[in-house]
Image (cartoon, rainbow, N blue to C red):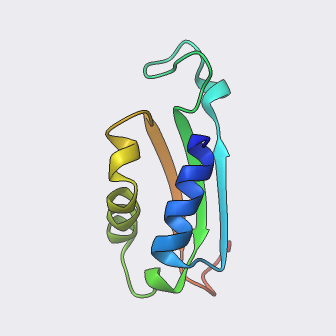
């Protein structure tokens, strides 16, 4: 299974989001630290979930990092996160 799909599945299971988009941005980091041929190293996540209601930005990032601990300790070099609760601006 592709890393993008693994990330999507884990976040879907952990947070039951209203919306979720996982973007593989590895091609933008060619020649940078952590990049490998074939990509699947740099991702951006956009997620809207009720699980984030009342949580700080740092807490939201910690929740996501915890859900993806195995991936972050393995092949994923970088993860940019935009996590919002329903009804927050920009969702």
Residue 32: x and y, percent?
A: 50, 17
Residue 7 appears left or right of 58:
right
Q: Residue furthest top?
A: 31
For the image, the number of numbered tags is: 0
- Position of the C terminus, as image quadrant, is bottom right
43 lies above or below 40: below
Image coordinates of residue 57 in percent, x first then y, are 40, 68
Residue 59, located in which quarter of the rendered image? bottom left
Is 81 displayed left or right of 69 in the figure? right
Q: Would residue 64 appear left or right of 10 to someone viewing this image?
A: left
The residue drawn where x is 55% and y is 79% is: 16
- Residue 59 lies left or right of residue 44; in this view the side is left
Q: Quadrant of the N terminus?
A: top right
Q: From this view, report whether residue 70 is shown above or below residue 89.
A: above
In percent of width and height, residue 3 lies at: 56, 42
Q: Residue drawn 58% across and 23% down?
A: 29
Quarter of the figure with residue 64: bottom left
Q: 61 or 3: which is nearer to us? A: 3
Q: Residue at x 61, y 46 (%)?
A: 4
Q: Residue at x 63, y 87 (%)?
A: 87
Q: Residue furthest front?
A: 1
x then y, percent, for residue 88: 60, 82
């Amino acid at each position: 299974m592709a890393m993008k799909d693994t990330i999507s599945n884990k976040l879907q299971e952990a947070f039951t989001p209203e919306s979720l988009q996982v973007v593989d941005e590895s091609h933008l980091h060619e020649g940078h630290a952590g990049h490998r041929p074939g990509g699947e190293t740099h991702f951006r996540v956009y997620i809207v979930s009720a699980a984030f209601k009342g949580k700080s930005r740092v807490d939201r990032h910690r929740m996501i990092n915890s859900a993806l601990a195995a991936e972050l300790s393995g092949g994923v070099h970088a993860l940019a996160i935009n996590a919002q609760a329903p009804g927050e601006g920009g969702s």
